[in-house]
Image: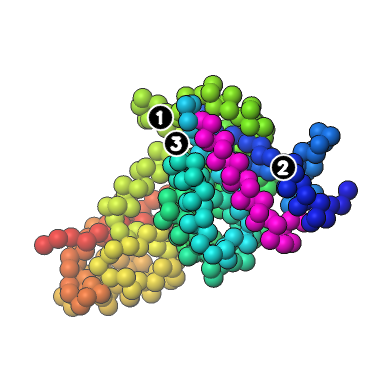
Amino acid sequence: MNYSAEDVRKALENKELCVYYQPLYVTVTSQLKSAEALVRWIKKDGSIVSPASFIPVAEESDLIMDIDWYVTELVCQTLEKQNYMPQFPISVNFSRKHIGEKDFAKKLSDLVDKYELPHPLIEVEITESAIVSEENRLFEWITSIREAGFTVAIDDFGSGLSSLNFVKDVPADVLKIDKSLLSHNCEDEKERIVLESIFTFAHRLHLKTVAEGVETKEQLAFLRSCDCNKIQGYIFARPMPEEDYLSLCMAHKAAEEPADILQMQNHASAVNLLMEVVFRRYPLIIFTNLSRNTYYAMVYQNFTTTSCPSTGIFDELIEHGTASMHPDDREIFSAAFNRKKLISEYYAGKQEIHLVTRQLGDDGIYRKAETFYYFVKSGNSEDIIAIALCQNLTD
């Protein structure tokens, strides 16, 4: 059946629209952590209209904004009923039309404050497609929401419009991975590689991750190995009416960490913690393929100089680095990290090269910099790989 905007407006006025809640669980512990609010249209005769049948109609006008605020108030009422039971954060979907809404963050704050709720209990979800189409105004909008104490999630990531460069710059808190990326049940090698890459870059950008549409044990097992933070999907729970959701919350204690988190640590999570320490110690980390004369800077922050290209030809990198050295150190630097010399050292059985030089900083001052080159072996290639770890030294 086709519904008009007037049909939807009457349903809103008659309070036929209600909220269902789909719980989200901690991936590793299966502990209830939060929920997403999903609008449903339940007619007087008890029949349920799919959101796909009326949300697109509402999106064509500002009616969708009225629905979003209506849903948000129902969510606040649900959270208010939890004052004497465990409260879990709830995410609410907002149309891209709100990006242009005047004083959105203040309006949201006033509504939440009306029910005397902590702001972190509400998470604002906006779809990836909205982010792409409203790029110019988005940053200010998200910043205002976060400054008001709410969190922001990018929904449906990977649904077809993703821009990794843009996600890198969006000041959001959560990345929700679209279920389409799990379409091969995490048993396809290419699918696993894509997912692993997404979780790795999300972690490095300090984004929490949620996998949507998880339905099988195979998907869950793989996502646990990827350090995915939360799971949403039928494997744990379908969307449910408020009464059932409140009963579920009563049955769960507030989310607690295990006594010793190391006992719950999966391999990917442990590696990520290790990498955080490495990145903190070495502000410049360069991956080099000596066989192919290429490199890329995996980390480049707060180093003596910031003029190094992030990727390119390794020989040119060494020429660039040599030029930035103190005149008395240029020859030794060039000789130590000459590509042919490094390959020769590799075949001679060397495992690492270490050198301390004086490098010209962006401020025109020479400072000591320490460089370690480690030779490593890739299981996927015969290429000669070296990793440079560089740090500033204090005199």
Judging depth in this view, the residue of 157 and 115 nearest the camera is 115
Q: CA distance from mark 3 to mark 1?
A: 18 Å
Q: CA distance from mark 2 to mark 1?
A: 39 Å
Q: Picture coordinates of residue 93 (x, y %)?
A: 61, 49
Left or right: 1, with 309 as reference point: right
Q: Picture coordinates of residue 172 (x, y %)?
A: 48, 55
- Seen from this angle, which residue lies furthest right? 1
Instruction: Give the class, few, some or many, for how many residues have Cα within 10 Å of label 1's Cα (few <14, many ≥20).
Output: few
Q: Amino acid at mark 2?
A: Lys
Q: Picture coordinates of residue 297 (x, y %)?
A: 39, 63
x 37%, y 47%: residue:
275
Q: Marks 1 and 3: in contact by CB < 8 Å?
A: no
Instruction: Give the class, few, some or many, for how many residues have Cα within 10 Å of label 3's Cα (few <14, many ≥20).
Output: few
In magenta, the rendered stretch is 57-82
**Element carrying mark 2:** loop
Q: Marks 2 and 3: in contact by CB < 8 Å?
A: no
Residue labelled with disc 2: 15
Residue 71 on the magenta span: yes
Residue labelled with disc 3: 267
Q: CA distance from mark 3 to mark 2?
A: 49 Å
Residue 311 on the magenta span: no
Residue 257 is marked as: 1
x 54%, y 31%: residue:
81
Q: Amino acid at mark 1?
A: Glu
**Element carrying mark 1:** loop
Of mark 3 and mark 2, the one earlier in the sequence is: 2
Query: What colour scheme has been applied to the protein in the rendered image?
Result: rainbow
Left or right: 300, with 230 as reference point: left
- Seen from this angle, which residue lies furthest top? 251
**Element carrying mark 3:** helix
